[in-house]
Image (cartoon, rainbow, N blue to C red):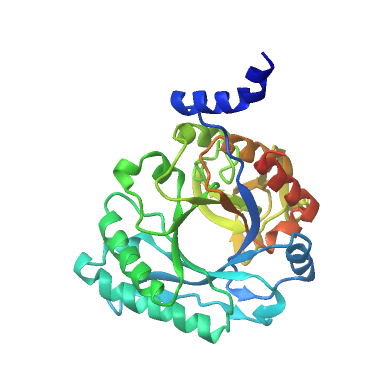
Amino acid sequence: MNQFWRYSPIIFGIVCLLAGCKQQVHPVVRPAFYHWKTTFDPAPEARQLVQNMETERIYLHLFDIDWDEGLKAPAPIAYLEPRQPLDVFKVEWVPTVFITNRSLTRLPIQSAADFAERLTGKVLEQIEALKLQRVPEVQLDCDWTQSTRDVYFEILKTCRAELSKAGINLSATIRLHQLRYPEQTGVPPADRGMLMYYNMGEVRHWEEPNSILNLAAAAPYLQTKSYALPLDLALPVFQWGVLFREGEMIRLLSGLSANDLSDPERFYDMKGGRYEVVQGTFLQGHYLYEGDLIRLETVNQEALHIAVDQLRGFDWAGDVFLTFYELDSAPELGLDAAALDAVIKAFEGE
């Protein structure tokens, strides 16, 4: 009997193996941030946050790609403008480029490889100009669709081959619908994916509770527990206002807070994060009319904990970069290193 108990862990392991058992593997989570503003000028609070969290990576938005009607081709816009030396952070850098889906709809697939070569050259040029020292990866961010999949994947394929010559990997962002339905959207030819776990609600609907992090809306997409690429994870740490006029969404007001709407002579607090403009006024350089409506959306630590609880059952890679979007916004939400470290520990299963 004693011999049985001595070897029972081994027996149990063999039985599990034969029965197809699989123990949940907790990933090693590495902290990272996105920097998405067009100017690199992090506030002291942001610099302290990176240091206190022992942040390993910053995904650095270099520029966007949009369709240029004059050139009749996709072209870079909104280049990053450094106002501080980037070596203020001792991290790995992942240069990131956003590509609009409309660029892909108008780019002939026979031109995709040539465009990808020019794009890669521009990225490598910016890496050199910005003097980025540790660049293990470049990321392309695009919400491609079934109709633009082929041209986008051709771009990824070529970029990956070109970057590999410099010893740099390629990652691609993955939205929830791409995670859930890879048979329709395909799996991008990249080394890794970044699951963008935010902006999952119906932002254009006034009744939407919170389009940034609508966890009830996200749940059905998590029926799948694995993906054909190793995935990292991006979570939101930002806020905005959604402006409505005559029942239609007009625009997003980035970084808007309740304090910006605290003047009762201009804004009526309808409760639940909703406001009515009661007097015409300017806000963030836009003129608001009487009767306009604003839905204020934000993220707190509790919501982030629920999000990682939803995601723990997924089959993650051994190492996961848990990447908070966006660096400068986190301190504005009152999310300090202790709060975000607690989210990381919750994701690790501690």
Question: Residue 6: percent from the left, percent from the top?
Answer: 67, 23
Q: Is residue 201 left or right of residue 52?
A: left
Residue lying at 19% horizontally and 69% vertically, measured from the top left: 110
Residue lying at 39% horizontally and 59% vertically, measured from the top left: 190
Placement of the C terminus among the 4 image quadrants: top right
Residue lying at 37% horizontally and 75% vertically, measured from the top left: 119
Residue lying at 69% horizontally and 73% vertically, measured from the top left: 90
Which of the 4 image quarters holds residue 325? bottom right
The residue lying toward the viewer, choosing from 51 and 330, is 51
Residue 67 appears in view: yes
Question: Residue 260: percent from the left, percent from the top?
Answer: 74, 56
Furthest toward the left, the residue is 110
- State the count of labels: 0
Furthest toward the top, the residue is 1
Q: Is residue 147 left or right of residue 82?
A: left
The residue lying toward the viewer, choosing from 174 and 41, is 174
Q: Where is 222 relative to 164, above or below?
A: above
Question: Residue 235: percent from the left, percent from the top?
Answer: 60, 50
Residue 300 appears in view: no
Q: Where is 119 relative to 6, above or below?
A: below
Question: Residue 196: percent from the left, percent from the top?
Answer: 52, 50
Furthest toward the bottom, the residue is 129
Which of the 4 image quarters holds residue 92? bottom right
The residue lying toward the viewer, choosing from 350 and 327, is 350
The residue lying toward the viewer, choosing from 90 and 86, is 90
Q: Where is 7 relative to 60, above or below?
A: above
Placement of the N terminus among the 4 image quadrants: top right
